[in-house]
Image: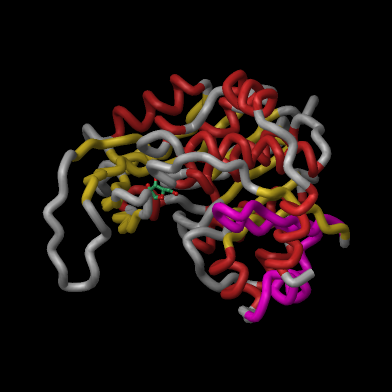
């Protein structure tokens, strides 16, 4: 069978977002402004990003409660062209996330996993037609480990976005082709916080991509370093920017892009996502990313140099 599908297995949450002058400190009450709900969840956001990046058909394994919150989550996936494979949990509510979004585009997120915690190893669908599996850490770790191991054994490329940050068993890391982390996650997994280069040197996954926010990203793939400076945008909401990066990176790699093109595409898509409110609502279509890339001036050579210096290469 032709292995063409991209499978995302992970979380879906309804995001409850309130905008406020700043994110409250512990014990502080902040008087916020407008409130809205958005389809979110790291897994579902990444599935939508995969599908919108065009190319390989995208499926998603997820769990939803038998409640009203599930309805917009399923609809958002279907609208984006994702085929959802849903485990229904009548005894668990659909996952929710409570997000405070500050005027300087910072956020603080608390997740109530609900149905997401019901996902198990045995829920993984047959992998015959799957070329790439994309995972995150908002579902039980035992299930994530079992899915990665099964996919690796079936010859499927396995990508893990290790968010939210937590330490991981060696058996899971050994099943990965590509690990995507931010700086905090890199420090936790590598036990090395002195520099990005030092953290990378401690991880033995064949491909590691480190996102560096407004600086850009760095990848070490089969021993080679690749640097991608960030596109400069006026950020209003960075929620799901990392998910947009991971989903589009997986989609472009599945389409056969080389790592440099895939990093450039994922960086552009996540930059666009930062300029829009919400999680899945912020993820651009393929045509928008292409136009953005066409209209973006080339980076000056100093951009790569300063990224290399920041990473202490
Ligand atoms: O990465 C952003 C996502 O984290 C939000 O959509 C929220 O649901 C949490 O899962």
Locate the N terminus by quadrant.
top right
Quarter residue 192 falls in: bottom right
**Span of residues in magenta:** 194-222
Q: Is residue 90 above or below residue 77?
A: below
Left or right, residue 35 beside residue 10: left
Q: Is residue 250 above or below residue 193?
A: above
The residue sitting at the right extreme is: 223
Taking 46 as reference, is 189 left or right?
A: right
Where in the figure is residue 11, as x and y percent of width and height?
44, 46
| Residue 123 can be seen, yes or no | no
Q: Which residue is more in the foreground, 14 or 99?
A: 99
Q: Image quadrant for the C terminus?
A: bottom right
For image coordinates 22% across by 46% down, the residue present is: 18
In the image: residue 283, left or right of residue 104: right
Q: Residue placed at 29% from the left, 47% from the top?
A: 96
* Residue under the point 24% across and 69% down: 25
């Amino acid at each position: 069978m032709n292995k063409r599908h991209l499978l995302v297995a992970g979380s879906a949450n309804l995001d409850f977002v309130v905008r406020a002058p700043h994110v409250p400190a512990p014990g502080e009450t902040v008087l916020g402004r407008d409130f809205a709900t958005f389809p979110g969840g790291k897994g579902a956001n990444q599935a939508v990003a995969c599908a919108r990046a065009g190319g390989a058909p995208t499926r998603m394994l997820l769990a939803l409660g038998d409640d009203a919150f599930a309805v917009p989550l399923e609809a958002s996936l279907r609208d984006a062209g994702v085929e959802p494979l849903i485990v229904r949990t009548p005894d668990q509510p659909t996952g929710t996330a409570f997000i405070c979004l500050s005027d300087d585009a910072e956020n603080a997120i608390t997740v109530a996993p609900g149905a997401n915690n019901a996902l198990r190893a045995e829920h993984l669908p047959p992998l015959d037609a799957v070329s790439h599996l994309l995972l995150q850490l908002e579902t039980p770790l035992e299930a994530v480990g079992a899915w990665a191991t099964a996919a690796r054994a079936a010859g499927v490329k396995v990508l893990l976005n290790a968010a939210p940050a937590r330490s991981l068993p060696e058996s899971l890391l050994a099943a990965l082709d590509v690990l995507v982390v931010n700086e905090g996650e890199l420090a936790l997994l590598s036990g090395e916080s002195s520099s990005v280069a030092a953290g990378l040197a401690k991880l033995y996954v064949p491909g590691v991509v480190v996102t560096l926010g407004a600086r850009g990203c760095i990848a070490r793939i089969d021993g080679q370093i690749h640097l991608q400076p960030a596109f400069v945008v006026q950020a209003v909401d960075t929620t799901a920017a990392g998910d947009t990066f991971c989903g589009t990176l997986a989609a472009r790699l599945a389409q056969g892009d080389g790592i440099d093109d895939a990093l450039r595409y994922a960086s552009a898509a996540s930059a666009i996502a930062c300029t829009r409110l919400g999680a899945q609502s912020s993820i651009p279509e393929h045509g928008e990313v292409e136009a953005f890339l066409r209209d973006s001036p080339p980076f000056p050579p100093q951009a790569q140099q300063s990224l290399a210096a920041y990473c202490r290469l």
